[in-house]
Image (cartoon, grey):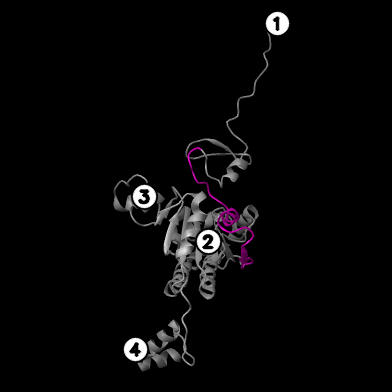
Amino acid sequence: MPIKLPSFRPRKDAYPPDLWTKCPSCSEMLFNKQLDKVDRVCPTCGHHFRLSAAARLELLLDEHSFAERDPGLQSLDPLGFVDQKPYPDRIAAAQLATGMRDAAVRGTGRIDGRDVAICVMDFGFMGGSMGAVVGEKVTRAAEDALAERVPLIIVSASGGARMQEGTLALMQLAKTCAALERLRASRVPYISVMSDPTTGGVFASYAVLGDVNLAEPNALIGFAGARVAAGTIAQELPPGFQRSEFLFEHGFIDRVVHRRDLRKEIGALLRFMRPAEAPQVPEGRPGFSPIGFLSSLAEKVVPDELTEVGRG
């Protein structure tokens, strides 16, 4: 009678994703709780994992200093966009997965006791894509920084503009840039922090307009993908193309800062970069209004007959 040997289950190479994370750089298996204790930076190779908006705020700001503003803003579906599933369903799924209303959180807080206006993006919400809500939060953060004369800090983590909102998403590029230009003209500091990834329309607008542009190590930063860029110029791209170290070497980024040093670096910058005092407008003399100036200029330049036609 043949002997029946006990069967052994094959060894599983998969680890529970809620307990372990595999480092994409060194392939080390990392225990999630230990990884969270080191700000989600691989202790073996230094790879920077992506951070949620809540973890980023906790990392940068003084304890219990954050006060959120506009928490109820939420994207609508003005285009009735449907791809594999309707846009509202995608929003609902992202909200359920992240606990956020949209891909950005903004408010006020303190860093080393200094008041700041801050806006943080979360790549976990539809790839951190910028729609009308994200653009509005960035713009309002800049406007609050201008009104309260406090430095502005924006932490970017995005794949670009949100295609489900079409032209409405692209309009956010101009809107955010206009708000930041008003901030710059008033000499209120703006520090931009680029994390992995910062690409597309976010890169093409507010992410690179900081008075100081910081980036985390090995972050993917650029407009179009490397394959598109290589195909456009019909040349092989240099090693490390579109990574933060490459951009630093070519003068596009001011500093590449390790995550554990980021708060200290921003705190040091804030000690030097202080908002200018608000200009005093003489009594009885109105301040400069860009819209009013352009309207009066148009009345002088445009012929009277065209003006009458436009009014009619």
Which picture quadrant has residue 305?
A: bottom left
Earlier sequence position, callout 2 versus callout 4: 2
Marks 1/3 in contact by CB < 8 Å: the verdict is: no
Q: Secondary structure at mark 4?
A: helix
Task: Give how far apart the Cα atoms at labels 4 and 3 are.
Answer: 48 Å
The residue labelled by disc 3 is 246
Q: Which mark is residue 164?
A: 2
The residue labelled by disc 4 is 301
Task: Give how far apart the Cα atoms at labels 2 and 3 are.
Answer: 32 Å
Task: Give how far apart the Cα atoms at labels 1 and 3 are.
Answer: 70 Å
Direction top: furthest residue: 1
In magenta, the rendered stretch is 44-72
Is 35 in front, or is 21? 35
Give the foreground label among 2 and 4.
Answer: 4
Say what amino acid the circle numbered 3 marks. Phe
Say what amino acid the circle numbered 2 marks. Gln
The residue labelled by disc 1 is 1
Task: Give how far apart the Cα atoms at labels 2 and 4 are.
Answer: 40 Å
The residue sitting at 36% across, 91% down in the picture is 300
